[in-house]
Image (cartoon, grey):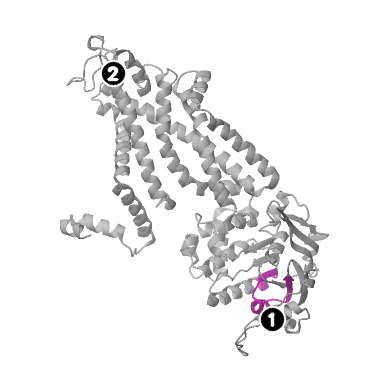
């Protein structure tokens, strides 16, 4: 597959009809992704998670997704039937969600849940799936895979849960992983560990990664490219290394609003918004 | 705690209890067993639940050892010379109009009652689960088409709920013909709607949770999500409802038997026994009263046990 176009999106719109009219959560978003790490940043409600979910066909019922172009590995994603989505999800694209406390099934063993993705997409014996799951647990640096295999979600710490989630989503070796704020629910010390594991796995397997976060610092150091979203639009797209040279006033304001150890400030800057950004 | 130490139970029992109740379990198995033990203690320390448990356990015991309990007297052999004998040493609960020993018939009747209850439970729970989870999951996630399926399934459920239960069971039993199997089918057809309601309510709240989205993301089909991920989570509330409903099932079965549409003579079925004693209720009260009491006590037992189980299994009620 060519490096340029794992995923191509042009004019993606997601809207939710409601009582007070139509809410447009994502407006005319266009971007493309190769086998690289793309960060999407923005405040709450800026449409970054919705964009991620739209790519996986997970916008719930009344929501409407339209796009001029939305292709993944050459396959058109628009109006894809359920059966096709099932083949795609897990096997070719998957997603790590925010909080492992809620995204792991409380009544199934961790190992069984990890195995499930594999068995959904590969014809395999129980033993084979099991050894795969154990190998995957080891790959996400869980010290005692045999023990953790038999544990339930509530018996894991947040960091371990999120690593199990990553194992679950990567076991079928997808080409694209969408990480929706994978570290927001974790301790700061654990965050780095999980990020490093994610980084290693993504680099080793040569996958594409969309990293959704509201943490500019993490995105800046972790990703190759950054999309900045505001009010459902992509206001700026730039290389992560050039974040400091951002042109859009919103991006500049976001950077200014982040605290810095080298230049401590008594009061952080507040983002002033310009309604013109939305047009 | 102090009372327990001063009464000084035997050392072995104390250590087993200590091992089970330990708040620092040494192994995973100890923790699991300890949890089961604590649940059991909670159930038993609740006096009403304990009463229910004892009644249901006695019912099971009598059903298993019916010949032994009845002193190897036959529940169907007639002895017309002893007809309508009063309760006494020879016949503890007296005899009926054919001289059959009522105590033996009550003892063997537990088997009939338990058979009906078990068969109905086996039929009703899967139907309720299937209808409820399908309606709930599709209604919550599958957009307009799902909403229509949800509405259709739940309105059918409502229609069944709108009929008085015994009358509907009576109509089905009448149409199918008398007999235990048909009584089971008739009762099942009227007993599933509450289970569908409960399963749907549970499913709607589960369907929107993140871990179901995660399974969708793994590429699982709707059927797989329903049976592997949603059904197990609905089970505990369904089990509680089932034990609470067993009293109703027993009463409906007895009602059908009373009206001649349940078990057929000479099967010792409690409802039919009450019916046969009706003619002599003032002169020989025991013929109708004793099976009636049996129905009453067993229904009460299941209700008490169900209440206790709800307190133990459902964290929301405590």
Residue depicted at 56% across the width and 41% down the height: B132
Q: What is the quadrant of residue B28 in the picture?
A: bottom left
Q: Position of residue B293 (x, y in %)?
A: 30, 27
Q: Which mark is residue B287?
A: 2
Q: Position of residue B174 (x, y in %)?
A: 50, 18
Please rate how many residues cluster around mark 2, counting C-alpha atoms within 10 Å: few if below 14, some from 14 to 19, many from 20: many
* Rendered view: B250 above or below A256: above
Question: Is B122 situated left or right of A65 in this image?
Answer: left
Q: Residue furthest right?
A: A68
Magenta stretch holds residue A207: yes
Q: Residue furthest front?
A: A20
Q: Residue furthest top?
A: B81
Question: Is B301 situated left or right of A222 in this image?
Answer: left
Q: Which mark is residue A108?
A: none
Give, as a single range, the part of the protein colored magenta: A202-229
Question: Is A30 situated left or right of B44 in this image?
Answer: right
Magenta stretch holds residue B126: no
Taking depth in this image into account, of B176 and A137 the one nearest to the observer is B176
For the N terminus of chain B, give its image quadrant: bottom left
In the rendered image, which residue does mark 1 sit on? Answer: A255
* Rendered view: B159 above or below A259: above
Q: What is the quadrant of residue A216 in the picture?
A: bottom right
Residue depicted at 59% across the width and 45% down the height: B136
* Rendered view: A179 above or below B193: below
Residue depicted at 26% across the width and 18% down the height: B285
């Amino acid at each position: 597959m060519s490096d340029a176009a794992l995923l191509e999106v042009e004019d993606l719109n997601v809207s939710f009809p409601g009582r007070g009219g139509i809410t447009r959560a994502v407006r005319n978003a266009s971007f493309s992704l190769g086998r690289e790490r793309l960060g999407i940043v923005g405040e709450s409600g800026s449409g970054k998670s919705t964009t991620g979910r739209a790519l996986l066909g997970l916008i719930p019922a009344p929501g409407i997704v339209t796009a001029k172009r939305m292709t993944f590995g050459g396959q058109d994603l628009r109006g894809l039937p359920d059966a096709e989505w099932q083949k795609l999800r897990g096997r070719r694209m998957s997603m790590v969600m925010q909080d492992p406390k809620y995204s792991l099934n409380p009544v199934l063993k961790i190992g069984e849940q990890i195995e499930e993705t594999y068995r959904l997409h590969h014809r395999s014996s129980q033993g084979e799936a099991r050894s795969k799951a154990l190998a995957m647990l080891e790959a996400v640096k869980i010290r005692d895979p045999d023990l953790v295999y038999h544990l339930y979600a509530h018996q894991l710490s947040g960091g371990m849960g999120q690593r199990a989630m990553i194992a679950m989503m990567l076991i079928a070796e997808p080409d694209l992983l969408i990480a929706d704020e994978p570290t927001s629910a974790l301790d700061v010390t654990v965050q780095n560990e999980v990020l490093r594991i994610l980084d290693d796995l993504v680099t080793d397997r040569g996958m594409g990664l969309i990293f959704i976060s509201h943490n500019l610092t993490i995105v800046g150091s972790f990703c190759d490219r950054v999309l900045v979203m505001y009010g459902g639009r992509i206001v700026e797209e730039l290389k992560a290394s050039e974040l400091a040279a951002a042109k859009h006033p919103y991006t500049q304001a976001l950077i200014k609003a982040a605290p810095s150890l080298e230049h401590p400030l008594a009061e952080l800057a507040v983002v002033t918004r310009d309604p013109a950004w939305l047009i | 705690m102090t009372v327990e130490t001063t009464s000084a139970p035997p050392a072995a029992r104390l250590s087993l209890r200590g091992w089970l109740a330990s708040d620092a379990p040494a192994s995973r198995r100890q923790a699991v067993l300890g949890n089961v033990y604590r649940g059991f203690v909670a159930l038993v320390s609740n006096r009403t639940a304990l009463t229910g448990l004892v009644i249901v356990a006695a019912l099971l015991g009598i059903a298993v050892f019916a010949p032994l309990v009845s002193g190897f007297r036959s529940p169907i052999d007639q002895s017309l010379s002893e007809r309508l004998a009063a309760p006494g040493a020879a016949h503890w609960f007296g005899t009926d109009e054919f001289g059959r020993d009522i105590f033996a018939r009550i003892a063997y009747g537990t088997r009939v009652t338990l058979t009906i209850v078990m068969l109905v439970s086996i039929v009703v729970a899967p139907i309720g689960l299937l209808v409820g989870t399908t309606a709930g999951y599709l209604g919550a996630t599958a957009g307009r088409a799902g909403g229509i399926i949800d509405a259709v399934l739940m309105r059918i459920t409502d229609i069944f709920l709108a009929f008085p239960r015994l009358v509907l069971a009576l109509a089905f039993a009448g149409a199918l013909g008398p007999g235990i199997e048909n009584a089971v089918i008739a009762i099942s057809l009227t007993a599933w709607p509450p289970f569908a309601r409960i399963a749907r309510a549970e499913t709607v709240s589960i369907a929107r949770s993140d871990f179901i989205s995660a399974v969708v993301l793994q590429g699982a089909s709707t059927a797989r999500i329903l049976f592997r991920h949603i059904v197990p989570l609905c089970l505990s509330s369904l089990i509680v409802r089932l034990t609470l409903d067993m009293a109703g099932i027993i009463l409906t079965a007895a009602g059908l038997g009373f009206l001649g549409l349940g078990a057929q003579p000479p099967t010792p079925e409690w409802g039919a026994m009450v019916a046969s004693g009706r003619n002599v209720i003032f002169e020989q009260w025991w013929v109708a009263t004793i099976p009636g009491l049996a129905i009453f006590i067993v229904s009460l037992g299941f209700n008490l046990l169900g209440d206790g189980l709800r307190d133990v299994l459902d964290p929301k009620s405590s």
